[in-house]
């Protein structure tokens, strides 16, 4: 996807006000990336596709008003902060353990007045269980560990959206039959070499 194609992909999924917020966000990200290592420098040139569109595509997999949305290990903001910027009306919870990243996430939420986006600066293991409608995580942990840490936040109707790169199918294949029945793998719309593990419900044995 070219930069223009990436931007067009995003424009199909959010309104013009959100597109303006994303343009500002990318300027802020570039500048903050000089102070702390948020994303690889190489990915900045292609950030509309690699970060914004890659995150926004998750919206295609849930009904429009679905929330609360829990994003684990949000880092610089992907995918959870992007979802909150695109849809400020959704309740989004970002969990991130590194202090400077937490400060960055809080700063962006404040800059755009994202009142329904809550940044939780803690390890996921340490936070109280709350039932959520969507659980997302990109580059957070191998699938087995991810499910072990986060199953307690899920309900029988929770949607799981787990962008996984090339390892998606293999990681899922290594899980129990019950987990394999609950999840499936879909091709990423933004990266031909990546995929998303998608599921519904609460994993067994939790
Ligand atoms: C590889 S980065 C990915 C960041 C972002 N999701 C992305 O795709 O660009 C993983 C992030 O998860 C955070 N993290 C790792 N373990 C965590 C935990 N147990 N609880 C909360 N955050 C954690 C790290 O601090 C880091 O920012």
Image (tube, rainbow, N blue to C red):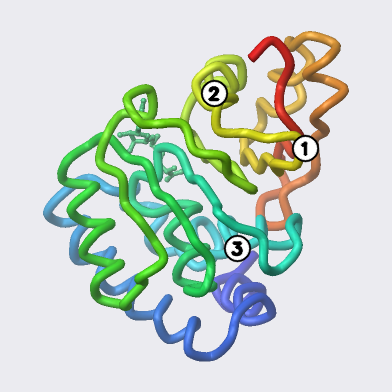
Name above or below for residue 23 compared with residue 109. below
SS at mark 3 in the image: helix
For ligand 1, give the image quadrant. Answer: top left
Q: Which mark, residue 146?
A: 2
Q: Residues within 10 Å of mark 1 (few under 14, many from 20)?
A: many
Q: Which mark, residue 21?
A: none
Beta carbon at label 1 within 8 Å of ligand 1: no
SS at mark 2 in the image: helix
Q: How many marks?
A: 3
Name above or below for residue 70 compared with residue 51. above
User: In the orientation shown, which residue stands out farthest toward the bottom?
Assistant: 16
Of marks 3 and 1, the one in the foreground = 1
Name the residue located 46 percent from the left edge and 31 percent from the top edge: 129
Observer-nearest of 121 and 33: 121
Residue 98 in percent (x, y) is at 22, 37
Give yes or no for contact between labels 2 and 1 (Cβ–Cβ under 8 Å).
no
Of marks 2 and 3, the one in the foreground = 2
Observer-nearest of 79 and 92: 92
Name above or below for residue 176 compared with residue 40. above
Name the residue located 49 percent from the left edge and 83 percent from the top edge: 19
Q: Earlier in the sequence, mark 3 or mark 1?
A: 3
- Per the model, the C-alpha gap separating discs 2 and 1 is 15 Å
Residue 196 in percent (x, y) is at 70, 41
Residue marked by disc 3? 56
Residue 14 in percent (x, y) is at 60, 79
Give yes or no for contact between labels 3 and 1 (Cβ–Cβ under 8 Å).
no
SS at mark 1 in the image: strand
Q: Which mark, residue 200?
A: 1
């Amino acid at each position: 996807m070219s930069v223009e194609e990436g931007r067009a992909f995003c424009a199909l999924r959010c309104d013009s006000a959100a597109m303006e917020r994303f343009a500002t966000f990318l300027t802020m990200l570039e500048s903050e990336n000089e102070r702390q290592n948020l994303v690889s420098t190489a990915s900045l040139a292609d950030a509309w596709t690699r970060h914004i569109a890659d995150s926004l595509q998750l919206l295609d997999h849930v009904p429009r008003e679905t929330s609360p949305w829990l994003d684990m290990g949000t880092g610089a903001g992907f995918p959870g902060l992007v979802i909150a910027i695109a849809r400020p009306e959704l309740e989004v919870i970002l969990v991130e353990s590194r202090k400077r990243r937490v400060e960055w996430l809080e700063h962006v939420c404040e800059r755009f007045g994202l009142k329904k986006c809550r940044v939780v600066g803690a390890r996921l293991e340490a936070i109280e269980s709350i039932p959520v409608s969507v659980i997302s995580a990109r580059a957070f942990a191998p699938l087995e560990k991810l499910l072990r840490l986060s199953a307690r936040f899920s309900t029988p109707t929770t949607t799981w959206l787990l962008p996984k790169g090339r390892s998606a199918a293999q990681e899922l294949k290594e899980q129990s039959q019950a987990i394999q029945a609950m999840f499936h793998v879909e091709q990423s719309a933004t990266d031909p070499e990546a995929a998303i593990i998608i599921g519904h419900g609460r994993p067994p044995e939790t």
